Amino acid sequence: MKSRPFLSLLFLVLFAFGCDKKDSNPLDLTGKIVIPASTQDTVLFFNSVDNISIPVFISFPVSASTSIPATVVMHGSGGNWQDEDTDNDNIADQITEWELSSQNKQWKSNFDGESILSAFPGSYYRRGTVENEGDWKNPPLQFKISASFIRNYDAYGTLDLLRRLVRDDGTPIVIPDKVAILGFSHGATAVQSTLFDTSVVPNNWEWSQSYSGQQYTAEILPPASLPEDGGFVAGVMYYPGSFHNSYYGNPCNGSSIFQTYADFIIHLPSEDSLSPNSECMLETVSNNGGGISTAYRYQGADHGFDGKSSGDDGQASTLARERTMTFLKTKLQ
């Protein structure tokens, strides 16, 4: 792996104390992360459910001088960072550490322009892979980066991290109840699991997943629970999987327990083989209740259309981004 210096701060202590010279009482910032006012981009870490230290690239809009809303961005199967295929097997195997992928850079710019802090947790490479390809799509490796029961813990770990960011006077950088979540493909499937309302789980429910007719239970974790101080205010999903290998039951035969605690929008391309399962998920949500879902469908567009610049994919990308930003700005007001 290539490595380069962090753009701003390598690491900030999690237990910081400051003093106000005008007040003899010390300013207690225990458990907070102090961010200097000049910081624009940095990478911070937290330990996820599997005790892996997860890096989070955080962009602080230059225009932000007070507490601002935020959005957590969950990367797709291509990973969080700029990468390349060095052995010509069509699978990326080397990253430029701490340099966001081109898609993430575009979204970072979108959020910067709206004075919304953006955070990009990297779920893959510290767990052993650059992207979700090859053997990583199936057990046992898929369980290490699962969108159903690993990456949702990454999302909530990032939310907790953002809620602990403060200026040196103790002012919160992020408005704690104004944080949304956005995801693409594998990351959008993780958004679903993150927004899942765990309060509706039946008492006798057994968490499992099925691959090629084999059911797995011992390797499967329960979903992340909603934090005591609340979860995400809303979510956006781009072309997710939505089936979860029957983790929530089968959404297409009426056995799924899936529902969300927050409203969300979902972008579905007509030429994506994953879209039918998402249509079943939407029917499940409609029947089960919970958050309000809004679906946008794009005729002629394919999986991964976000960021494309030509044809049906380009038109879908432009329109979906407009709809996404309109939705998020409404929810983050």
Image: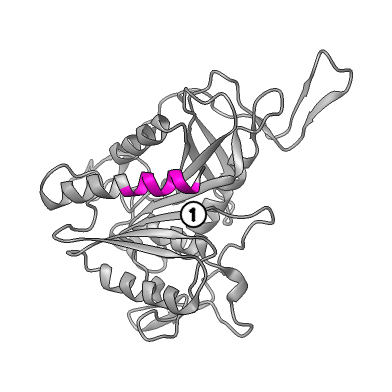
Residue furthest right in the image:
24
Question: Residue 48 magenta-drawn?
Answer: no
Residue at position x 59%, y 55% in the image: 231
Nearer to us in this view, 322 or 107: 322
Main SS category, magenta section: helix
* Residue type at tag 1: Ala
State the colouring used for the structure image. Answer: one colour
Nearer to us in this view, 40 or 127: 40
Instruction: Give the left or right position of residue 282, taking residue 276 as reference.
Output: right
Query: What is the quadrant of residue 140 in the picture?
Result: bottom left
Asked if 202 appears above or below 88 in the picture, the reply is below
Percent position (x, y) of residue 224? 58, 62
Query: What is the quadrant of residue 261 in the picture?
Result: bottom right
Percent position (x, y) of residue 239? 30, 60
Q: Assign a secondary structure to mark 1.
A: loop
Residue at position x 19%, y 65% in the image: 270
Total marks placed: 1
The answer to whether residue 238 is seen in the rendering is yes
Asked if 133 appears above or below 330 in the picture, the reply is below
Residue furthest top in the image:
21
Percent position (x, y) of residue 121? 47, 44
Q: Residues within 10 Å of mark 1 (few under 14, many from 20)?
A: many
Question: Residue 328 magenta-drawn?
Answer: yes
Residue at position x 83%, y 13% in the image: 22
Quadrant of the frame with the N terminus: top left
Instruction: Give the left or right position of residue 305, taking residue 321 as reference.
Output: left
Residue bearing the label numbered 1: 234
Percent position (x, y) of residue 36? 60, 21
The answer to whether residue 89 is seen in the rendering is no
Which span of residues is magenta-colored? Answer: 323-331
Query: What is the quadrant of residue 299 in the picture?
Result: bottom left
Residue at position x 45%, y 24% in the image: 7
